[in-house]
Image (tube, grey):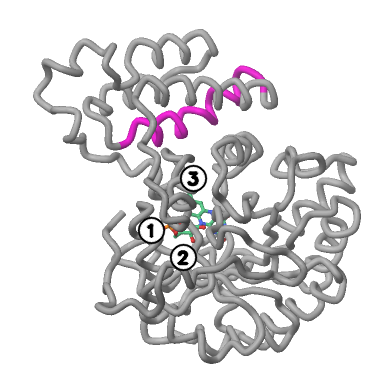
Amino acid sequence: MGMMPTLAEHPLRPLAAIQPFWIGPLKVDPPVLQAPMAGYTNFAYRQIVREFGGAGLQATEMISALGFLAQEERENELPDRLWGVADEARPLAVQVWDNDPARLAAVGARLAHEFRVSVVDINFGCPVKQVTEKAHSGSYLLKTPDRVGAIVERVAAACAPTPVTAKIRLGCTRDKINAVDVAQVVEQAGGAALTVHGRTAQDFFKGSADWERIAEIKPYLKRIPLIGNGDLCTAEQALHALTHYAVDGVMIARAALGKPWLFRQVQAALRGEPIPPDLTPLEERELLLHHFDLVVQRFGETKGTLLMRKFACCYAQGRPHAREFRTRVSRVARVAEFIEVVERYFPCEAHPLWRTGPAGPCDSDEPDGCCETP
Ligand SMILES: Cc1cc2nc3c(=O)[nH]c(=O)nc-3n(C[C@H](O)[C@H](O)[C@H](O)COP(=O)(O)O)c2cc1C
């Protein structure tokens, strides 16, 4: 994760001018959103973010409309990715993906009217081949703004009065950046907000998010808010984006995986209050075990432990001697093993190498990228 790329020199507005914004009838307060992340932003993660507070709107993982309908027909069951959605606190956005307006509308309507979610978000940004090349969905749809419009229109009509939003990238490739066109299409089709990740699909996660390009979209939107996304890793960076770029809100993804308290820090910074410190390593270890507990309660020992390996890596990221912990935790298969490895090796003061080892607490091992790949 790099630093913010092009830092506009002069603030566009003072801190006091940063206000909550509206997605249809929903007030997003503070104007800082927790991004959807497949494989990560399940109920357990959202619950932990909620416990710390500070996210104005939280999102689920992306849910396949085709998969939703097929699973329901075949097994009379709902996708795992809807875990928690029926009962958890609001506001909550559920993200869906597909390329078929009718399927998306059918699933959107269910989410809006039956589950009563706050927002139905449509994914037009995913660059993964399974979604683009195989299913002609996600960022593949940026090639055909008309189809984006047809989808948003149909889903917005099916979900009303629940707002429908879109999440896009700048374009498919660097030489085909068309976010301004797509943004206008989304607005005209009845979308209630637009989130833009400042990279193209071709970039995947390489290079830096282009915040200048995100802000260029703002004058073209007459009615709906613009949410900027990409490479915000600290409260200071989130504040910088909000004060220096023409966006109504910011969305944070990867940096908040190992630091679910980041939203609380941004919220304090926005209020002009001192930024609460990061968790101590011991507090973080407790949090990881709490997270593990939530996941195992739902998915059971085998699947739950497997799922938590990657979260454990995220929590350890940036800590000294994290490498040894990651290597060990990546092999555990049982609850008792997981707890033992966390208690013995999670990088914290109790760890024998913490004070004596070559890396001091301010240095970090090379990240293994566990939080960097979709
Ligand atoms: C592991 C992973 C999974 C992701 N899954 C989704 C997803 O389901 N839907 C989506 O719109 N974006 C997804 N994204 C993209 C993020 O929401 C976000 O746009 C991107 O990571 C840039 O923000 P960041 O620099 O704050 O991480 C994913 C990203 C990662 C790293």
Image quadrant assignment for residue 366: top left
Task: Report if the CB atoms under discs 1 and 2 are less than 8 Å apart.
Answer: yes
Image quadrant assignment for residue 130: bottom right
Task: Name the magenta segment's main secondary structure.
Answer: helix
In what quadrant of the picture does the N terminus appear? bottom left
In terms of secondary structure, where does tag 3 sit?
Answer: helix
Q: Residue at x 26, y 28 (%)?
A: 323
Mark 2, ligand 1, within 8 Å: the answer is yes
The residue identified by callout 3 is 264
- Spatial separation of the CA atoms under disc 1 and disc 3: 14 Å
Q: Nearer the viewer, residue 8 or 285?
A: 8
At label 1, which amino acid type do we have? Answer: Leu
Q: Which residues are magenta?
A: 300-317
How far across and down, in percent of the image, does residue 55 sit? 57, 51
Q: Residue at x 55, y 62 (%)?
A: 31
At label 3, which amino acid type do we have? Answer: Arg
Mark 1, ligand 1, within 8 Å: the answer is yes
* Of callouts 3 and 2, the N-terminal one: 2
In terms of secondary structure, where does tag 1 sit?
Answer: loop
The residue identified by callout 1 is 232
